[in-house]
Image (cartoon, rainbow, N blue to C red):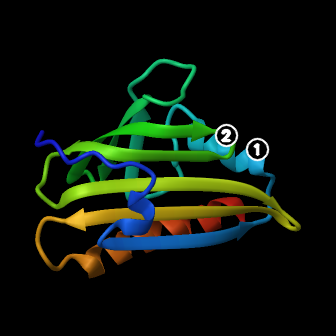
Amino acid sequence: MPRLQPVDEDFFTTAPRRRAYVLELPVSPERVWRGLTASNPLWWCRLLSVEHTSPRPFGVGTTRRASVLGVLRMRERFFRWERGRQSFWAESANLPVFRRFAEDYLVEPSAGGCRFTWTFAWEPVVRGGDRVNAAVFGSLVADTRRHFGG
């Protein structure tokens, strides 16, 4: 698979394209965190298939494979793994869609349960594709709200 360019946490503020979703969920932060760190994280997202390729315990350097609609396949590596916060970048992808791609998960306690901020940051290879990305990201967020009752 072709390699993508690496990123760090600054990319979430400097990326050419960025989308952040704030989900107020009526469940504990621990429950959301368990879903993000499961062997098959985000299993409730219909368009997504994800599996860790690193052994436990997970942390910085953990790798996983992700597939969107069974079409776009990426290999991902975590560069931040703290309690309540994870960030990763896509090391490679089978399709030349992104030059750089990363996601950040922030799970914080809130009055009604927890606040899950899900940030996507990317640099596209070519112009266009924003509607497709918005539809995919929107589906992942809707599935997450439905799963946790938000």
Where does label 2 land, which residue? 34
Residue 136 location in percent, x, y? Answer: 36, 69
Residue 85 location in percent, x, y? Answer: 61, 47
Specify the amino acid type for callout 2: Arg
How many numbered marks have been drawn onto this rendered protein structure? 2
Residue at 36% in and 76% down: 134
Specify the amino acid type for callout 1: Glu
**Relative to 17, is 83 on the left or the right?**
right
Q: Nearer the viewer, residue 74 or 120?
A: 120
Q: Above or below — where is 1 with respect to 8?
A: above
Q: What separation in Å lies between label 1 and label 2 (alpha carbons)?
A: 6 Å
Q: Above or below — where is 116 with respect to 8?
A: below
Q: Nearer the viewer, residue 17 or 49?
A: 17
Residue at 44% in and 73% down: 19
Residue at 39% in and 48% down: 8
Which residue sits furthest right? 111
Residue 2 location in percent, x, y? Answer: 11, 43
Considering the image in quadrants, where does the N terminus appear?
top left
Q: Secondary structure at mark 1?
A: helix
Q: Above or below — where is 92 with respect to 54?
A: below
Where does label 1 land, which residue? 30
Considering the image in quadrants, where does the C terminus appear?
bottom right
Q: Quadrant of residue 52?
A: top left
Evaluate whether residue 150 shows in this view. Answer: no
Residue at 67% in and 44% down: 33
**Relative to 46, is 109 on the left or the right?**
right
Check disc 2: other Cα within 10 Å, few if <14, some if 14-19, many if 20+. Answer: few
Mark 1 and 2 residues: CB-CB less than 8 Å, in contact?
yes
Q: Quadrant of residue 112?
A: bottom right
**Relative to 99, is 143 on the left or the right?**
right
